[in-house]
Image: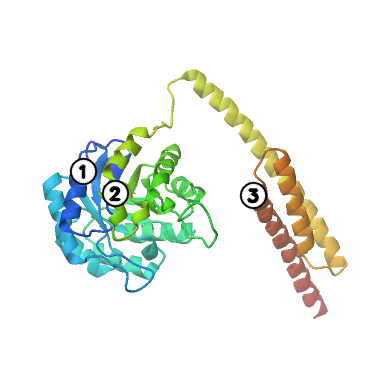
C-alpha cells in the first residue's frame, strides 16, 4: 500500500496534528465562532464538522446537509484552516468535492460495510484527496485494513487511520472501549500509515478527553481529532463529549510528548539490556508453550483411547480460576490471566479436536 506522509501534504506540520470542530454543523454562526476560536490554537490545523449524521434512531438530528458544506467553505476562506467532513456514499463525495472540502473522513458505521467503502472509493478515483478512515464499530482489524486497501486501490495515497474506539455491550468507563492493541497492531502492520485518535468518541465525556489524548501520545499516535463546541451543553448532538476551545487549549498545553529515540547513550544501553531480558523470557515462554501443547497431545491421545470429549467445561473453569488467583497473588491482573488462559485453552481444545478428527478419518478409511 503506497501512503504519502502527512508532512508531504500538510506543510510545516508539528506533532501532534490536531483536528478540532463541532460534532455537527448547526448554524453558520456556530461554525464561524468555533473556527475563529480554534484557529487561535497553534496546533490546530484542520477544522472538522459533521454535515450528514448517521443516527441509530429515526427522527433524530441527522445533520444540516449540503448547506453545511458552504459554511465549511467559508470557514476555510475566513481562517485559512483546512476543512474536513464525513462522507458515507458517492453522493456525499460528489457534493464535498464540489464545495472544495480539503479532506474527507469515513465514519465507523460506514467502514464496517465493504460495499459502502467501495462505492466511496469508486467515486474518489482520479482525485487523490486525503481520506481518513475510522475503525469499524466492531473490533475487526481486517475490516479496517480492507477499507484502507480499497481506497489505496482507487489511487488514494494520502491516507490516515482514526482510532475512535469499539462498541461493546459490556458496561465500561468508555463510550467506545479503546482496545489499544488493535491500533498498535495496525501500526505494526502498516508502519507508514499515520494514525490519529478520536478521544471524544472513545470517552463520551469531555472531562476524560485529556486522559485519552495523553494515552494516544504515549503510544506514538500522530494526532488527535477532538470535538470542540463554543457551548457544548447546547450542542445538537453528542453534547457530553465536546470540549470548549478553551478546554482544548488546556489539553494541548498539558500533553507530555515522547520521542521514539533518546540521545542519552546510557538510556540506550539500559533499554537494550532490558529488551534482551524480555527476548529471553519470550523465548522461554514459547518453549514452555511448546512443551505444554506436547502434553495436550498426549492428553488428547488418552481421551481418544477412553472415548472422552476434547472439551471439558468444568476443567476449563477450574484451570482459569486457579491461574487468575495465582496471577492476583503475584500482583498481575486477574482479568489478564483469564483472557490469556482462555486463548491457551481454546488452542488446546483445537489441537485435541483435530487429533480426534484425524483419528476418525483414519478409522473410517481403515474400515473401508
What element does badge 1 sit on?
Answer: helix
What element does badge 3 sit on?
Answer: helix
Q: Position of residue 300 (x, y in %)?
A: 80, 61
Residue 306 position by quadrant: bottom right
Q: Where is residue 118 in the image (x, y as percent from the top left)?
A: 33, 67
Q: Report whether residue 97 is seen.
A: no
Residue in the image at 81% along x and 75% along y: 366
Q: Distance between the Cα atoms at labels 2 and 3? A: 35 Å
Q: How many marks?
A: 3
Q: Where is residue 6 in the image (x, y as percent from the top left)?
A: 29, 43
Q: Which of 131 and 60 is in front in this view?
A: 60
Judging by the rendered image, the residue that carries numbered circle 1 is 37
In contact (CB < 8 Å): disc 1 and disc 3: no
What element does badge 2 sit on?
Answer: loop
| Label ID, residue 228 | 2
In contact (CB < 8 Å): disc 2 and disc 1: yes
Q: Which of 148 and 204 is in front in this view?
A: 204
Q: Position of residue 227 (x, y in %)?
A: 31, 50
Q: In this view, does 215 lie above or below 306?
A: above
Q: In this view, does 82 lie to the left or right of 289?
A: left
Q: Which mark is nearer the camera, 1 or 3?
A: 1
Q: Report whether residue 332 is seen.
A: yes
Precedes in sequence: disc 1 or disc 3: 1
In contact (CB < 8 Å): disc 2 and disc 3: no
Give the residue at the far bottom of this rendering: 368
Q: In which quarter of the image is the C terminus?
A: bottom right
Judging by the rendered image, the residue that carries numbered circle 3 is 335
Specify few, some or many for label 2: CA neighbours under 10 Å numbering under 14, 14-19, or 20 or more: many
Amino acid at each position: 500500500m503506497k501512503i504519502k506522509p502527512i508532512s508531504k501534504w500538510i506543510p510545516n506540520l508539528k506533532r501532534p496534528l490536531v483536528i478540532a470542530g463541532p460534532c455537527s454543523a448547526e448554524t453558520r454562526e456556530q461554525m464561524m465562532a468555533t473556527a475563529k476560536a480554534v484557529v487561535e490554537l497553534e496546533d490546530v490545523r484542520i477544522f472538522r464538522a459533521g454535515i450528514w449524521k448517521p443516527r441509530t434512531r429515526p427522527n433524530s438530528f441527522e445533520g444540516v446537509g449540503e448547506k453545511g458544506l458552504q459554511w465549511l467553505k467559508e470557514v476555510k476562506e475566513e481562517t485559512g484552516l483546512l476543512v474536513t467532513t464525513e462522507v458515507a456514499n458517492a453522493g456525499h463525495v460528489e457534493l464535498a468535492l464540489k464545495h472544495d472540502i480539503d479532506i474527507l473522513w469515513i465514519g465507523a458505521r460506514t467502514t464496517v460495510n465493504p460495499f459502502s467503502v467501495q462505492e466511496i472509493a469508486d467515486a474518489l478515483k482520479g482525485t487523490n484527496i486525503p481520506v481518513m478512515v475510522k475503525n469499524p464499530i466492531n473490533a475487526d482489524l481486517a475490516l479496517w485494513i480492507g477499507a484502507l486497501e480499497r481506497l489505496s486501490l482507487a489511487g488514494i495515497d494520502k491516507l490516515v487511520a482514526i482510532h475512535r474506539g469499539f462498541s461493546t455491550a459490556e458496561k465500561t468507563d468508555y463510550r467506545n472501549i479503546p482496545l489499544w492493541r488493535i491500533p498498535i497492531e495496525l501500526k505494526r502492520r502498516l508502519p507508514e500509515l499515520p494514525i490519529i485518535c478520536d478521544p471524544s468518541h472513545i470517552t463520551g465525556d469531555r472531562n476524560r478527553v485529556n486522559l485519552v489524548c495523553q494515552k494516544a501520545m504515549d503510544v506514538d499516535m500522530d494526532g488527535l481529532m477532538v470535538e470542540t463546541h463554543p457551548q457544548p451543553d447546547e450542542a445538537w448532538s453528542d453534547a457530553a463529549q465536546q470540549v470548549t476551545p478553551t478546554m482544548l487549549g488546556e489539553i494541548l498545553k498539558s500533553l507530555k510528548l515522547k520521542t521514539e529515540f533518546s540521545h542519552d547513550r546510557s538510556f540506550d544501553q539500559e533499554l537494550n539490556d532490558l529488551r534482551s531480558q524480555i527476548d529471553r523470557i519470550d523465548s522461554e515462554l514459547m518453549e514452555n508453550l511448546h512443551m505444554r501443547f506436547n502434553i495436550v497431545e498426549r492428553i488428547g491421545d488418552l481421551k481418544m483411547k477412553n472415548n472422552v470429549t476434547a472439551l471439558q467445561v468444568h476443567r476449563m473453569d477450574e484451570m482459569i480460576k486457579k491461574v487468575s488467583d495465582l496471577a492476583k497473588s503475584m500482583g498481575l491482573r486477574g482479568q489478564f490471566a483469564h483472557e490469556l488462559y482462555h486463548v491457551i485453552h481454546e488452542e488446546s481444545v483445537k489441537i485435541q479436536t483435530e487429533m480426534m478428527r484425524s483419528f476418525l478419518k483414519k478409522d473410517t478409511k481403515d474400515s473401508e
